[in-house]
Structures are given as C-alpha cells and as structure tokens.
Image (cartoon, helix red, strand yellow):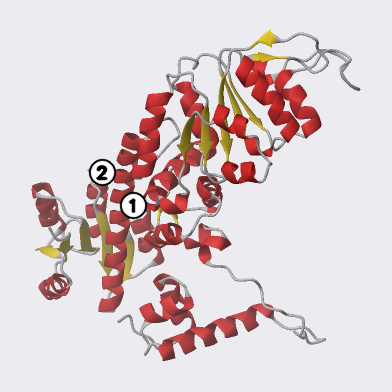
Amino acid sequence: MPERILVVDDEASMRKMLEILFREEGYGVVTAASAEEALRALAHSPFELVLSDIRMPGLSGLELLKRIRQEEAPTEVILMTAYSSTESAIEALRLGAFDYITKPFQVEELSNIVRHAFEKRRLAEENVLLREELARKEQFGGLVAANSRMKAVFALIERVAPTPSTILIRGESGTGKELVARTLHQRSPRARRPFVPVNCGGIPETLLESELFGHVKGAFTGAHASKKGLFDTAQGGTLFLDEIAEMSPAMQVKLLRALQERTVRPVGGEEEHPTDVRVVAATNQDIPRLIQEKRFREDLYYRINVITVSLPPLRERREDIPLLARHFLEKYARLMGREVPSLSAEALRRMESYPWPGNVRELENCMERAMALCDGDQIDLRHLPDPLLGARPLPDLAGVQIPEEGFSLTDTLEGIRAAYLKRALDLEGGIMTRAAARLGITFRSMRYFVKKYGLQAREA
C-alpha cells in the first residue's frame, strides 16, 4: 500500500498541483480545503504525512499541527506559507513540524523534504521493529543474535550449561567469549556461586600460579601473609580461564594436574586440598597448531576441550549488526540518561559493509562513541569513527610551504572544497546525487554546499 499524504490548502490550484505531483511520485494523496476538513479526514483514516498551508480561513496550519500532536499520532507535518518569518518557522518547529517551506518553492525542494520526512518515519518504524526483535532475540542476557550460527550457539549453551563438563570457547578477539562463559554459568546449577574470570595472558607467569592456587606466608619474597587462590575463590562456581593458550608449558602442567585430581596446592604449601569448580576456558588461537609447534600440551587440550563452543566473527553475522547496534545504543543511552537515538540509513549501510576486525567489542565501542558525540535524535555518518568512513592516511606534506606573512587556512580550504564540488558536478552533468556519491558525502551536504557556493546543479 503506498504511503499516504494529506494535502491541506485553501487554494484549489495549489491542491491540484500538489495532488498531481505526489501521485506521479507514487504516493496516495487526499486533499482538504481547510484545517477542519483535514481533521475530519484524519479522524476517518490515518495518514503518514500532512502537507499544510499555514494561513487559511478558520483554523490555521499551526492549529492543525497542535491538534495532530495532541492526538500523539505518528504523522509527520510539513508546513507551507507565502508569509515567511523567523518567528513562524521557529514556532512550527517548536510544535513538532518536520520542516517548513516558503511559497513559491521549487518542486524539487519540496519533493526532497517529503522524501526525507518519509525516510525519518521509516527509520522510526524500523527502530520499533528492532526493539521488538531485540526483545525476542535477547534470550541469554546480553547475547543478542538472529544469525543461524549464533542460534546454534544458544541451543548448545542450553544443552550443556546444566552439565559439569569443561568447556572451551573459541573465537576471535572481541566476539564475546566471556559473555558466553557468564551465560553458561548463569544457566548452570552453579549460578548462585561465584563466577571468577582470569586473563591468563594478562598476568606474568611468576604470579599466575599464585593467582590460581594461592600461596602460604613466606612462600616467596613479599608473601607477608597467606593468600587464597582463584580456584578457592570460585569454590562451587565457575572459573573462566581466558586466553588459556598464553600459559607457559610449566603452568600448563600444574593446571592439568589440578583439573585431573580436582585438588590444588598453594605455592609454598605442602598439602593439597580438594576444589569444586567448573572450568570454562577460552582462546582466540589455533590450539591444534600450537600443539604441533610444541607450545601447548596435547593432554591439557583434551582435558579442557570436552565441549567446544565456536563463535563466528561479526563479519560473518552481518544480520546481527542492526540488533547489536540498537542493543548498545539503549545500553549507553541509559548510562548517559538520554533518549535512544535512531541510526540513519547511511550510517547503518556503512556499518553493515565494514569488516569489524575488532568484532562485537569494536561495535560496542563505536556505539558508545556515537552516543557521546550525538547531539540530536539521530546518529549519522559524522558520528562514526574514521575506520568506518574509509579514512585514508594523510598525504606527505613535507614539501608544503606556508607564506611568511601567513594566510587564511579557512578560506583556502573553502576554495578547495568549492573547486572539488564544481569539478564533481561537471563530471556528473550537474546531477547532485551522483556528484555527492563521487565525493563520498551525503546528498543533504551536497545541496547545502551547492547553495552556499552558488553552483549550478540539479537533483536528477
């Protein structure tokens, strides 16, 4: 069903012209000669957009806008007037109008505003659908996915979480291995007991043994008191050994014994004591290759690899990017005490085409940054970091000369920009959409600079 526009104007010729224009563009159009007639039409059936004159006999366009907003209808409103003033424009936008245009107007300009209004509405609807889908997919706390491989991971977690089996989680850095480990713990019979994570690659080898198994007083220089190890801290719960492949061969032997015997001996101690923990390990390395290179013990690998959970990289689950982006925007909006912004279509397309070498962690950082920089209700390309925008390294500027008397950098850059815009327009026959694509900027930015520099251009 086509999107519907209600055109409201007391001039019959204007109504007819706008009806013909928007019908040719594929919209469903209904006309009204007054605000009162428009309200009756709105009461009878909903419209996605109302395009109304401001000055009309009876109720004005501003009054019509107020009535529509009082009903809290998700209808965009664009106001037209032949009597332009700053005050009326500010009032229209304050009351919630999408935009404001002065008669006489260029047909292309009005068509463009209408397209943008519908795009905003579609994005709002998509965000509602994303929230609903997010609620359906968020089955495991922070684990969010619609991808079939991730659904298989969810199903595997459901099956193995209640068991005591040791689990190895494999995946690139940033894919969410610790989150999977926490989910396994939360869905296990050990959920009421501690979940203790330790990064095996982040602790020096000389300290890792003491961290895991504890030590007795006087075991080494600086051991002024006995200390309980993480195996004991996690008693009855889950011990998560992240980046287990970073362990030294000597430490691997001691860990293997602890897993086999289910006992630990503190550094400097003479007696072992039993331990009851479930071990979940994780790695981003190819352990079979490390075994061939004699860098990882094969017997330890078989001990920790009872069940393997493999996480796909984000570039192989692109359908999850909108869901994850929305999830993180909601998270940081709560932390910052702000409303959740929408994602522009351009920003989302750029995110879906980016390879995400840092996986989900990089996406989360990107959304946190965008929330911090966004000062409106929509995140667009300017809020995304340079890697997503295809940033290139700076050219070699060693030979650049600056006059002794100095110069205006702003004016120089403005001149360069104007020259590039004009050249792109010349190459594309004056068509702004094509020139904008050639320069890697948005159509709105192109239109703004065309007006600013007085360039000759057309939309199509």
Q: Return the mark for residue 72.
A: 2
Q: Secondary structure at mark 1?
A: loop
In this view, the mark in front (2 or 1): 2
Task: Identify whether 415 is placed above or below 130.
Answer: below
In the rendered structure, the answer to whether residue 401 lies left or right of residue 197 reads right
From the image, tell me which residue sits under label 1: 95
Q: Secondary structure at mark 2?
A: loop
Q: Return the mark for residue 227.
A: none
Where in the figure is residue 71, as x and y percent of width and height?
22, 43
Residue sitting at x 42%, y 19%: 162
Looking at the image, the residue that sits furthest to the right is 221
Q: Is residue 105 visible?
A: no
Q: Quadrant of the N terminus?
A: bottom left
The amino acid type, in three-letter code, at marker 1 is Leu
Where in the figure is residue 308, as x and y percent of width and height?
48, 34
In the rendered structure, the answer to whether residue 284 lies left or right of residue 68 reads right
Residue sitting at x 52%, y 35%: 169
The amino acid type, in three-letter code, at marker 2 is Glu
Residue sitting at x 34%, y 70%: 84
Q: How much space separates mark 2 and mark 1, taking CA atoms? A: 12 Å
Where in the figure is residue 229, as x and y percent of width and height?
71, 18
